[in-house]
Image (cartoon, rainbow, N blue to C red):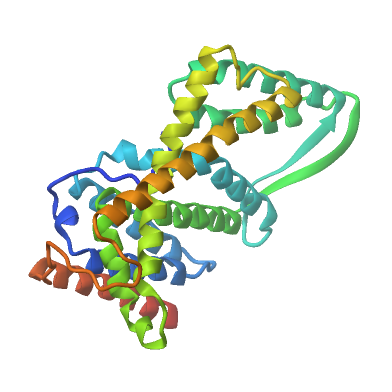
Amino acid sequence: MNNVTIGQYIAGDSWLHKLDPRIKLFSLVILLVATFLIPVSPNMTPLISMLAILVLVIGLTISSQVPLRKVLNGLKPIVFLLTFTFVIQLFYVKTGEMVAGPFEMYISVSSIAAIILFLVFYNMTKKYIKFRILYFFLAVFIIFLLQYVLPYIELTTYTIEIYDQGLLRAGFIFLRITNVIILTSLLTFTTMTTDLNYGIEALLKPLKLVKVPVDMIAMMLSLTLRYIPTLLIETEKIMKAQASRGVDFKESTFKEKISQIISLLIPVFVISFKRSEDLGNAMEVRGYVIGAKRTRIDEYIISLKDVLTIIMSIVILAAIIYMRVI
């Protein structure tokens, strides 16, 4: 639960915290567009460009005074997706020069039995391992290794051939997903809910010309982001309360897990409805009226650092478009 970083805000005094939320959101959109405009091609230029963006993102994280470990924790929920995407690209792409292989892999009675025993061992020991991500990668490697060294009572076989283009494409997609997750996490880490609401409303303001309720949309988006970590914290509290009463979410059978999930979801829904009702009452007491014009205590003024941030974002986007065109 603690690994989900979306919606969490970390108070700070860095230049990124002080940046105008409108500029911050607009710059994020520009950088995301630039990230997805980098094409996958047979040469190293796109991969170097993606690495350059990763260096920029890490530099932004360090300058924002947000703990780098906290940001990297946001990647834990998608480790399986990253690994699966990497392996698929590595084994699916068969163009370019072969750099490893061919490896004859055996799906046999011995390899299946060994993999099952290893998975049982992995699930029993992973809670004692400090660096679980590295342990997960090691487990994936061992699963393939067991298929390579245990051909006894063979059922079927397949061949693994690793090409340089597969490595380039796999690394490229891995870096792209990593950059997107870290960039979006930085936005919520350095922007309060009220500021985020104001930024979204300001960027969507032109839609008011076609009668789109921009202020309501902005409020809903900001509240949704804000209550993701709140509901996760409440869910964790309920899980700990049930664990203290003897409920084991890890060692139970599949049938027991279904009933445990149901017993977990019901109080989560009750709490979410109660919190939404309390929030609605609090907003009404403070004079919030849907669709009414609202004033603000703080008015944001575009400063020099905001202008420089936008210029740098546009320069990065222009450079990537130029490289794509040529």
Quadrant location of the C terminus in the rendered image: bottom left
Side of 29 where 301 appears, left or right: left
Q: Residue at x 69, y 33 (%)?
A: 144
Q: Is residue 21 left or right of residue 297?
A: right
Residue 252 at x, y percent in the picture: 68, 18
Is residue 326 visible in the rendered structure shown here? no
Relative image position of residue 24 (x, y in whole percent) = 25, 64
Q: Residue at x 24, y 55 (%)?
A: 286
Which residue is outermost to the bottom?
Answer: 209
- Comparing 156 with 13, the one in front is 13
**Which of 128/188 is in front?**
188
Q: How many marks?
A: 0
Q: Left or right: 86 with respect to 17?
A: right
* Residue 246, image x, y percentages: 58, 12
Q: Is residue 277 left or right of residue 94?
A: left
> Is residue 98 visible in this depiction of the protein?
yes
Residue 151: image quadrant is: top right
Residue 296 versus residue 94: which sits nearer the camera? Answer: 296
Vertical arrangement, residue 234 with respect to residue 288, above or below: above
Q: Nearer the viewer, residue 32 or 95?
A: 32
Q: Residue at x 36, y 87 (%)?
A: 209
Q: Measured from the top left, where is residue 11 in percent x and y? A: 20, 43
Residue, x 33% and y 59% (percent of image)?
A: 52
